[in-house]
Amino acid sequence: GQNIDQPTEMTATEGAIVQINCTYQTSGFNGLFWYQQHAGEAPTFLSYNVLDGLEEKGRFSSFLSRSKGYSYLLLKELQMKDSASYLCAVRDGGANNLFFGTGTRLTVIP
Amino acid sequence: DTAVSQTPKYLVTQMGNDKSIKCEQNLGHDTMYWYKQDSKKFLKIMFSYNNKELIINETVPNRFSPKSPDKAHLNLHINSLELGDSAVYFCASSQEGSGTALSFGPGTRLTVL
């Protein structure tokens, strides 16, 4: 089975840095994804990690530790438009399906 | 030039009815999916399908059935709709391979009265 945990809600200030954590226990592992979802919209792809370490993409970075079953998404220089839900998703090792966590609703305040 | 499209965007219907949601992708992807997002925003996989096999999440009632007329389409048929089926249904597609991300359609908000 799959178990993916994230904090339900977080609040951060415009211009600051925020880290959203994700822990997972899955039957097989074939990569971890982060998605952003604004209210009423579809999820959009942010980042992908399959090897341990940090992947940086502009203001967003994602880290993975496979031995710890742990990832985080780091958002720098927060902007109001970053207010959204951030979904951690793990691809399993069998059918290659993508399983999502419950998502973290981030609110950026002035 | 929409990558993954779904119709309708909104669907309001009575309990017991049968309805379909259509999905099309023009990305040339070989795998398509249906996800259900409930009121708590939890995104749960229902089906994945490529031209080789259909994988069904065992928790999905058999009132739900995917139909794929060709590689670019994966429609979702729902029989005998129930109140608990109210949710947003997302279609998605990806290219086969572990590193490829899913591209999601805009979602269909289904409300069962």
Image (cartoon, grey):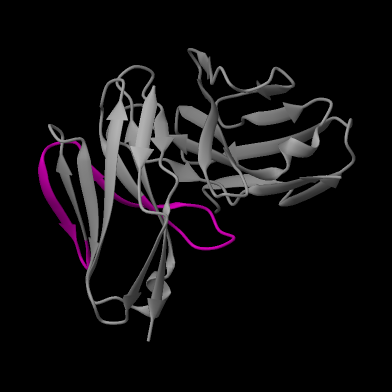
Q: Nearer the viewer, residue A55 or B72?
A: A55
Give residue A69's quadrant in the image: top left
Toward the bottom, the furthest residue is A110
Magenta span includes A55: yes
Q: Nearer the viewer, residue A22 or B9?
A: A22
Give residue A23's quadrant in the image: top left
- On the image, the x and y values in percent for residue B51 come to 50, 17
Q: Nearer the viewer, residue A65 or B73?
A: A65
Q: Quadrant of the N terminus of chain B?
A: bottom right
Left or right: B28, with A92 as reference point: right
- On the image, the x and y values in percent for residue B64 come to 70, 24
Q: Residue at x 81, y 31 (%)?
A: B81
Q: Residue at x 22, y 45 (%)?
A: A71
Left or right: B94, with A30 as reference point: right
Image height of A9 relative to B5, above or below: below
Magenta span includes B30: no
Toward the left, the furthest residue is A53
Please provide the residue range marked out in magenta. Answer: A35-60
Q: Residue at x 35, y 37 (%)?
A: A4
Left or right: B62, with A48 as reference point: right
Q: Residue at x 41, y 27 (%)?
A: A97
Give residue A98's quadrant in the image: top left
Toward the top, the furthest residue is B52
Left or right: B88, with A18 as reference point: right
Q: Quadrant of the C terminus of chain B?
A: top right
- On the image, the x and y values in percent for residue B10 come to 75, 52
Q: Nearer the viewer, residue A34 or A17?
A: A17
